[in-house]
Image: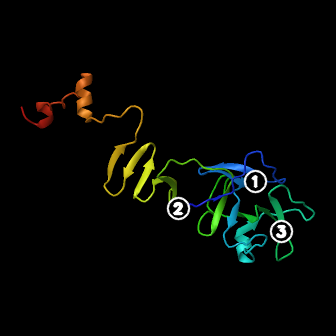
Amino acid sequence: MAVLAAFGAPADTVMPAGVATQKTVYGDVLADSRKMTLYAFDQDNAGKSACTGECADVRTPLAAPRIGRPVGDWTILTRDDGSKQWAYKGKPLYSFTGDRAPGDLSGDGGDWKAAMVGPVFMPAGVTIKTTDYGPTFANLGRADALYGGQLLLQCRCQRYAAPSDQPRRHRPAQANVRRAGRRSPPPPTPSPRATGLR
């Protein structure tokens, strides 16, 4: 299940050049100049990056200019190799080489959290679960998944209509055909010549 780092940045927050927000299935996230999702690392301490070496090859630090200055909640830290990196509210930010398109969240999971910039509205008892097929709405604490307004109970393999203003009435297809006055034609009777009987 995806767990996102909620930074709570309002839309009018001043951001450094090359940083923007990007819409994703989870809500708006901080993004780099290519609109790729930025992530925070739980093992980072305030003002110090714990992602170095091979980690930094996969999780690219958000580079800050050498002569840059802090802006609002944005600060600049110096990495072990001497390069500069942007941090937001004390958390260094990174992109992920596994993300292929703007809005991808492939790097979210474990100690890595997508940097959310606003609260995500989610009804009580519903969460977004990352699956092999992509993000899926799910009921908390149950083996349920929500698909297109319907609740599929995976444990019982039964479908129930989701609550709506007008309840859906499910009737057998044959009842609908009778009501409409349409019936399927009877199957054709084989001719005696086709059957070999005379």
Residue 171: where, in percent of width, then height?
Answer: 27, 35
Residue under label 3: 77
* Kind of element beneath mark 1: loop
User: Between tags 3 and 1, which lies in front?
Assistant: 3
Label 3 environment density (alpha carbons within 10 Å; few <14, some 14–19, many ≥20): many
What residue type is disc 2 on? Met
- Where's the C terminus, which quadrant? top left
Q: Nearer the viewer, residue 4 or 171?
A: 4
Q: CA distance from mark 1 to mark 2?
A: 26 Å
Q: Are marks 1 and 2 in contact (CB under 8 Å)?
A: no
**Residue at the outermost top position:** 181
What residue type is disc 1 on? Arg
Residue under label 2: 1
User: Between tags 3 and 2, which lies in front?
Assistant: 3
Q: Is 119 left or right of 89, judged from the image as shown? A: left
Q: CA distance from mark 3 to mark 1?
A: 22 Å
Q: Is 132 left or right of 41, judged from the image as shown? A: left
Mark found first going from the N terminus, 1 or 2: 2
Mark found first going from the N terminus, 3 or 2: 2
What residue type is disc 3 on? Leu
Count numbered badges in the picture.
3
Q: CA distance from mark 3 to mark 2?
A: 31 Å
